[in-house]
Image (tube, rainbow, N blue to C red):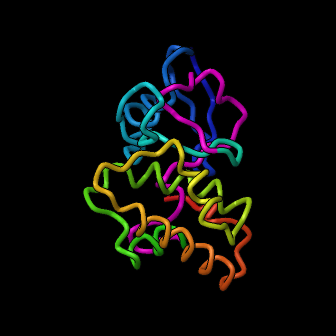
Amino acid sequence: MAISLKVNGEDKRIDADPATPLLYVLRDDLALNGAKYGCGLGQCGSCMVVVNGEAVLSCMTPVMLMEGREITTVEGLGTIEEPGPLQQAFIEMQAAQCGYCIPGMMMSAHALLRRNANPSDEDIRQALGTNLCRCGTHMRIMAAIRRAGELMQAAGLPAAGEGRTG
């Protein structure tokens, strides 16, 4: 079945079974490999993307529910040459260890920073409640999210890179 999606600001048309998880469509059909397959049960957050401003577990979301919605993946936050504020903050704070969970962490943080560019530690903990990191870099991740909020405010950005394509 043909399904129209808007991913990272670009219109895409794919042919997929409507029940296919969004994660598979992003990775297999659109070659957007930032969202990771972790548990497949919605318990780890490595597959997180942002849909209409909200963090969504793409492994649990049927692609048929995505028509007409704005989907942002980690690739939509910036590029290697021009990282967005969130990506820049994660680099500056050396927030990644193995890196597997980082795209999901960034997307949860992106949704949070769209609502609140100056989150408290409790706000950050709550936003990352679905994201697991086995490497234990939580303190650096939290520092990176606070730094991203500072970068956004300094640049006068209303959102953490929303609308950028990569």
Residue 132 located left or right of residue 50: left
Tell me: 35 left or right of 68. left
Magenta residues (range) = 55-84
Give the quadrant of the N terminus: top right
Q: Is residue 62 magenta?
A: yes
Displayed quadrant of residue 164: bottom right
- Residue 71 appears at what percent x and percent y? 61, 43
> Where residue 120 sits in the image (x, y, percent)?
65, 67
Measured from the top left, where is residue 87 in percent x and y?
Answer: 46, 68
Q: Quadrant of residue 109?
A: bottom right
The number of numbered discs placed on residues in the rendered structure image is 0
Q: Is residue 84 left or right of residue 149?
A: left
Q: Is residue 134 above or below residue 86?
A: above
Q: Is residue 156 magenta?
A: no
Image x and y of residue 5, in percent: 62, 34
Q: Relative to the observer, which residue lies in front, 128 or 25?
A: 128
- Compare residues 25 and 103 and report the one nearer the observer: 103
Most extreme residue toward the bottom is 154
Q: Is residue 87 above or below residue 107?
A: below
In the depicted structure, whether residue 38 falls above or below residue 136: above
Against 6, residue 148 (above or below) is below
Query: Which residue occupies 62% across, 65% down?
Result: 160
The residue at the point 49 percent across, 66 percent down is 142
Look at 67% across and 45% down and name the residue there.
Answer: 54
Left/right of residue 72 with respect to residue 75 in the rendered view: right
Point 70% across, 74% down: residue: 157
Q: Residue furthest left?
A: 98
- Quadrant in the rendering for residue 162: bottom right
